[in-house]
Structure formats: C-alpha cells, structure tokens
Amino acid sequence: MKKLIIIGSGFGGISLLLNLKKFCKNNKNLEIFLISKTNNFLFTPLLHEAIIDEVSIDNISYSIKELSKEIKNFSFIQDEVENIDFEEKKVFTYQNEYEYDYLVVSVGSEANFYENTQFKDKVFTLKSIKDYEKIKNKLEENKTKNLDIVVVGGGATGVEIIGSLSDVTPKNINLYLFELSDNILNELNNKELSNIAIEKITQKGINIKLLHEIKEINDNSIVSYDKQKDEYLYINTDFIIWTAGIKPSRLINKFDLKKDKKGRVLVDSYLNIPNDPNVFFMGDCAKVDSDEEEYTTAQNAVQQADIVAHNIYAKINFFSFSKKFKYIHQGSLISIGKGFAISDLYGVIFTGYSGWFIWKAIHLLKLINNKNRKDVLFDWIRSFRY
C-alpha cells in the first residue's frame, strides 16, 4: 500500500482530503496521513464575523479527526513538522519520523512584518482560533470603555475586520485603517471599486490613513510616517490588528529548493518540485514557475488541491496522463460591515446590499459540510434579528 503524507490543514490540505475521499472512495492502495499542529480546519473568511458574534466560532471550524470516520485508510497526526528529507522520502516531526511514497506540502502562510520583526509581539493577527480568542477577549474586557483600534493593511482582510468592528455596539470604538500605498483593496485591480470601498468606510466613521508607513509600535501608541505630507503621525491606541501582508510559513525556509522573490517554492505546471514527480507543493507556500502571477487566496489553494488529487489518483492507478494546473480567477468577495459588500463574480460586479447577499450566499456554499451551513445560516438569522 502506498503512503501519502499531507502537511497542513488549511484550505489546500482539507480540500485535497475531500477530493481524495471522492476519487479514492473504494481504493485500497493508498494510505493517507495528514500532519498539522492544529486539530481543526478554520473557515477564515468568516473569522471577522465570529469576532463580533455574527457567527459562532464553533460553526466555522471543523474537527479533522471527524474526517477519519469518513475517509478510508486516513489517519490524523497532530504534530509539527521540523524538516523533510526529500532524498530519503522522510518527514521529521518534533515527536517522530514518517516515510512516504507521495508528499503534499500545503503549510500556508503567516503574517509578514517585513523588516519590523519587533512588531510581532505587540499586535494581533487574524489567521487562527488563538487570534480570534485574543481579539475577542480584548473587546470583552473593554466593552464599557472607549477604544482606539488600529488596523494595519488595507487589503481584503483589513477592510473586512475593520468593517465588522464598526458595527459593534455601543458605538465606543474609534477606528483607524493604515495603508502603505495610495489606495485600498489593490488586489481588485479596479480603481472604481476601491473608491466605492473608501467612500463606504468613511461613511462608517473609520479614519483612513493612506500612504502611511508604520515606523514604531509602543504599548499604547503607534507612530507612522505620512509619505504625502512628509511628517510623522502619533496616535494613541488600545490595540493593533496587523493584516499588512503574508509570507510563506517559516518551515519553507528549511528546504533547499528553488524559490521566488517572495520565498515561495517554485513548482512545475503539475505542482511538482523539480525532478520529483511524487512531491507536490501548493497553496500560499508555492508558485508555478512561470510569468503568470498567482493569487495567495483560498480559491487558488482549492483549485490546486483538485489538480493534485487527480494527479495522485492517476499515479496509483497507472493512468498515462496527469493534469496541468491553470488558475481561473473566479472573482472577489469583500464585505464592509452589515448590509454592504463588493462581490465580483467572473467580472460581474455587485455592490451594496445585493453584493452583501451574494457574499453571504457564496460563503455559505463554500463551508465544509451541511451541518456547518445550517448552523451558520441560523447564526445569521439570529444576528440579523437582533
């Protein structure tokens, strides 16, 4: 029996498992192991809603151990990978070592502080249940006080969390959104939509600071440099949420593999590393070695997982063909608080309440199973009423 090891339990790893469940339903030739530090899959696109009680955190997370009841020959190993020997075909964790025939690395990304590594212990990030708990506890501890909250990073994650925080009642929060460039939501590549988002954010009383570079973060304040005015800005703050970019997981640094300028492992069009057709890298930690830019998004990881599942199934069944990966951008979904979202579906744009309805509907469909969908729907109905 061939052994497949999957490293990582994000969108890539879990989507791969679900695809293999479909492909290898009655297959007895493949034993699957998934190694991850965390024992759950978190649907991060709804994490900002969990922070303000729009949804329950339990309803957007899923126990990986539950999947072992649904997938034949599957085992979950809760451990952290220390290194990989690609020549000996071994994965080393801090507790054990495992041999493999096929390997898929989908370890995702972490917050990028660029040259300011000292900021790490002074801010909150927004990628895990621990991040949720820290921000949630901070809000609960200070719910009767006036709060000054800074979000650094004007991409989709920053815009969605600050939009949600602006809906928190009572209205005791002063919000600031800092962005290094001259616009927000640059990933949309659409100036008009970015302007619509700026107008909505401003209407919600959020202070937007464009062309500001964060220079210093202290216990109760933040210092930025205004590139346009050539002056420094000092703001008192109770806490800071950092969403200003990502970089591949630090595990990737240990591998002597060819990487791009962002530190992502370069793979071929089949998502294999050079000269090893049985090792796949995918998701935020990988980049197809071509001139085409790829999005570090969930949809990119999910599409890659579909290709990897097919190619592994083809190998164990001795098919003569494998599929090449070609990213298809399906659009973007960005909410800005209750009742407003920008939804781009294959170039068809919806904004406002219609965009918000589409945002809700698509995220509901993307949840991992029917129980999660039902529970989140009831959460939304409850929060809408109250």
Image (cartoon, rainbow, N blue to C red):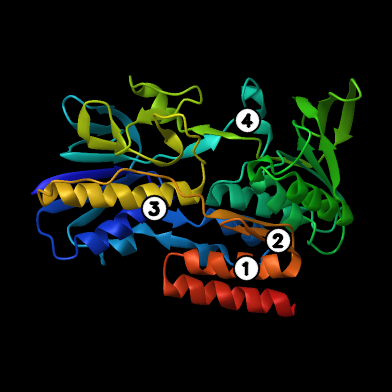
Image quarter for residue 269?
A: top left
- What residue is shown with label 4? 120
What residue sits 19% from the left and 52% below the top?
A: 313
Estimate the spatial distance between the alpha carbons at disc 2 and disc 3, rounded to whole Å. 32 Å
Q: Return the x and y of residue 183 as percentages of the image width and height.
A: 77, 38
Q: Name the front one of labels 3 and 1.
A: 1
- Say which mark, if any, is on residue 358: 1
What residue sits 27% from the left and 29% below the top?
A: 84
- What residue is shown with label 2? 341
Name the side, left or right, on which 240 lies relative to 15.
right
What residue sits 58% from the left and 70% below the top?
A: 361
Disc 1, SS:
helix
Residue type of the residue flagged with mark 3: Asn
Q: Are marks 1 and 2 in contact (CB under 8 Å)?
A: yes
Q: Establish if 348 lies above or below 322.
A: below
Q: Are marks 4 and 2 in contact (CB under 8 Å)?
A: no
> First in sequence: mark 2 or mark 3?
3
Q: Name the front one of labels 2 and 3.
A: 2
Estimate the spatial distance between the alpha carbons at disc 1 and disc 4, rounded to whole Å. 35 Å
Residue 70 in view (yes/no): yes
Estimate the spatial distance between the alpha carbons at disc 1 and disc 2, rounded to whole Å. 8 Å
- What residue is shown with label 3? 39
Residue type of the residue flagged with mark 2: Ala
- Mark 3, Cα crowd under 10 Å, few <14 / some 14-19 / many 20+, is some
> First in sequence: mark 3 or mark 1?
3
> First in sequence: mark 3 or mark 4?
3
